[in-house]
Image (cartoon, coloured by chain):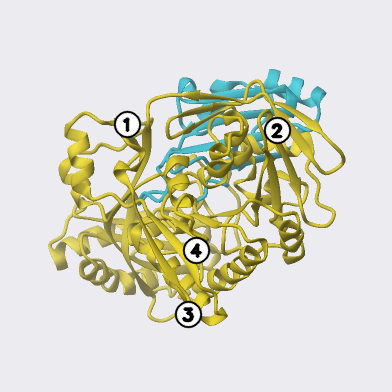
Chain colours: A yellow, B cyan
Amino acid sequence: MPTRVLVPSGVLGLGFDRAALARGVAGRPDVIAIDGGSTDSGPWSLGAGQSKYARAATKREWSLLMAARAAAGVPLVIGTAGTCGTDSAVDWMAGITAEIAAETGQRLRMARLYSSQPAERVVAALEAGRIAPLNPAPPIDAGRLRAMTNIVALAGVEQVQAALATGAEIVICGRTTDTAIIAALPLARGADAGAAWHGAKIAECGALCSTNPTSGVIQVDFDATGFTVEPLAEGARCTPHSVSAHMLYENADPFILHEPGGHLDVHGARYRALDDRRVRVEGSVWMPGPYTVKLEGAAIAGYQTTILAILRDARYVASARTWVARLTAFLTGLIADRMGLHPGTYALEFRLIGVDGTLGPLENRSGAPVEVGVLGLVTAETQDVAAEIGKLINPFVLHYPLTDDEDLPTFAFPYSPATTDRGPLYAFALNHVMHLDDPMAAFRMTVTEVGP
Amino acid sequence: MRLGDRVLKVRSKNAGPFWVTIDVFCGDAARFAEVAARLDTARVAALYGLAPDALRRFDIADLSVVKFSLPRPVVQGAPEDRDMHGAAWACLLEEAALD
């Protein structure tokens, strides 16, 4: 029995083609699945346990998907809710769902799959030898694990299947692999495992596997021998090239994909055009292995205050590197004298935008920019200290001269105050997997009713 | 000649927080064969300050793509990171001389 999965977009919050979504609903899907997250924007979301997308965008798009779900009469699943998939993000998404249900008069059964990991569980697993590092992995120990603000485990299909098996109409998952929410139902209904995981990987970014990447909506049909992918926007096409090329995207290895309980190998995949918009794929292989789940964690690496000045005077622009080296040496002495702080207890770095702001020491080009942005980054153990250093250096970032015997220059500050307190600076602190005897051992689930 | 002048596109993206992956879309079989033969892995690694064996290389004839994956020179979002999405690393390869 084929299983049809409708994927409205690569992520909730960036929009999709509504006509294409309506076409998808008319095609009678068995489930609607969308990803809600990624680590791609950096560690802040996981560190803070918050969504990076606007609540207004999330709510509007989710209400459209809930309406599509009602019209199709099938479950709606979101993976990695709220960008990071922490318990707080799952509850944020559940709150939005309850609001929409109340406003639209829908009475719904909602399952929540929680992926956050208590530090003590991970500490116990580490001590039992059940945590393995991936390459490259930051060092971990009990103290570092306990200091992390959030740890999540990436659920696979088993946990999503358990949530679907509750009969829930809405399934809000914490951190899952991008593919698990798409592969779960086809696998539960007997689809070929290689095809299920490969099709899910192709579909996880929505229409990115087609010739019209921003249109969002695609559908995938899974069966016992392969899968067929079709974009639903007017004029969008999938070709063997557009589909196979998607395996390159954000993948270190374009042929192997590691998932809980094994890995996908697409070396033998054959891509065939069924017509000018649909592609059939067969020949991918699922290789079962030990049941491990990947862990992600974030820790506070300090607190930041930033300052931005712009050099426009041609002499300073031409001598920006010399100037910033001289300024840094002066400020290091000033901070030691006024605050008794020495490098190592804080960090002060200036980046020259227009010189090598993007690539730093790897930059191999040079030129003659019109102006140079000087971005100062202060990182300290508390926000108070970072802010105090920011205030201390502010007048010198504004006025510091290139030589001792010249009038004080004044550079351009784009706003007042010139310093910005950024709050905690988070860092990714885990690249490990955890062995589980039972896939649900590190996850929990609740089922509630929402709506009138 | 710069590599970017010979191929369709050079793209880099994070592959998770700890890796970056760079795809060279050559466009057709002839340019793929030429680029695959002339791109020296050790020289590519040097652009990113890495030893040659730190780089994974995939020559994918079916897609006319040469792909390099490398441990990020700085972990994504670390205090020293300058490019959260890793997209600018492609510029170094795109601008590199092909010989």
Q: Is residue B44 visible?
A: yes
Secondary structure of the residue carrying tag 4 is: strand
| Residue A295 rendering spot, x and y as whole percentages | 35, 42
Marks 3/2 in contact by CB < 8 Å: the verdict is: no
Dot 2: chain letter: B
Crowdedness near tag 1: few (<14), some (14–19) or many (≥20) residues, C-alpha within 10 Å: some
Residues flagged by tags 3 and 2 on a common chain:
no
Q: Which residue is mark 1?
A: A133
Q: Nearer the viewer, mark 1 or mark 3?
A: 3
- Whichever of callouts 3 and 4 sits on the residue coming sooner in the sequence is 4
Q: Which residue is mark 4?
A: A373
Distance, label 2 to label 4, CA atoms, is 30 Å
* Residue A452: mark: 3
Crowdedness near tag 2: few (<14), some (14–19) or many (≥20) residues, C-alpha within 10 Å: many
| Residue A191 rendering spot, x and y as whole percentages | 61, 34
Q: Is residue B93 visible?
A: no
